[in-house]
Amino acid sequence: MDPAVTDDFKRSRESGVQESGVQESSIQENGMQESERAESQASFQPMPLNGICARLGDKWTVQVIWRLAMAEDHRLRFSEIKREVRGITQRMLTLTLRNLERDGLIERDYFPEVPPRVEYQLTVLGQSLLPALQGIHRWLAENLPQVEAHRQRYDDAKPC
């Protein structure tokens, strides 16, 4: 989570909630009223299992999305994706692309040429996922050294 969002969350909790459940409507630096912020925070609930989190947590999905996001026009041929995502088999890439297409995150364009050409591109829905992935990337960049230090301490303390 973005540190600014975390700080806003802490400030809103520290300032307290009025009996109506709505905070005072003073305007913060970013222009969002306290009542809007409290409503946004109160409405955050974990989503029920729907397969999307599992899909994003698998080994290949995010790598494929990143490759498409970095490509010119967010479009790549199957062979280009396979070449750029190291270690992925043809079968796993096929399954990953089918699942992303099924979820509406990419679209597949078939060109009846000789030899046939197939290209994949992010949809508007797929592109809307990029800011969330960038947030996770920022968090990793900021916190990976700490995570690695914790892992090392855990591994060193754990008897074999």
Image (cartoon, rainbow, N blue to C red):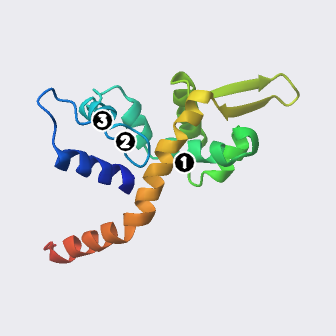
- In front: label 2 or label 1: 2
Which of these two is toward me, 24 or 123? 24
Q: Mark 3 points at which residue?
A: 25
Which of these two is toward me, 148 or 78? 148
Residue shown at 57% from the left, 42% from the top:
65
Label 1 environment density (alpha carbons within 10 Å; few <14, some 14–19, many ≥20):
some
Q: Are marks 2 and 3 in contact (CB under 8 Å)?
A: yes
Q: Are marks 1 and 3 in contact (CB under 8 Å)?
A: no
Mark 2 or mark 1: whose residue is earlier in sequence: 2
Q: Do the residues labelled 2 and 1 touch (CB within 8 Å)?
A: no
Label 3 environment density (alpha carbons within 10 Å; few <14, some 14–19, many ≥20):
few
Q: Which amino acid does label 1 sit on?
A: Gln
Mark 1 or mark 3: whose residue is earlier in sequence: 3
- Residue 115 location in percent, x, y? 85, 31
Q: Name the residue under label 2.
A: 27
Residue shown at 56% from the left, 28% from the top:
125
For the residues labelled 2 and 1, the Cα–Cα distance comes to: 39 Å
For the residues labelled 1 and 3, the Cα–Cα distance comes to: 42 Å
Whether residue 145 is situated above or below residue 131 in the rendered picture: below
Per the image, label 1 sits on a secondary structure element best described as: helix
**Residue 59 seen by the camera:** yes
Whether residue 65 is situated above or below residue 104 in the rendered picture: below
* Res 143 → quadrant: bottom left
Q: Name the residue under label 1.
A: 63
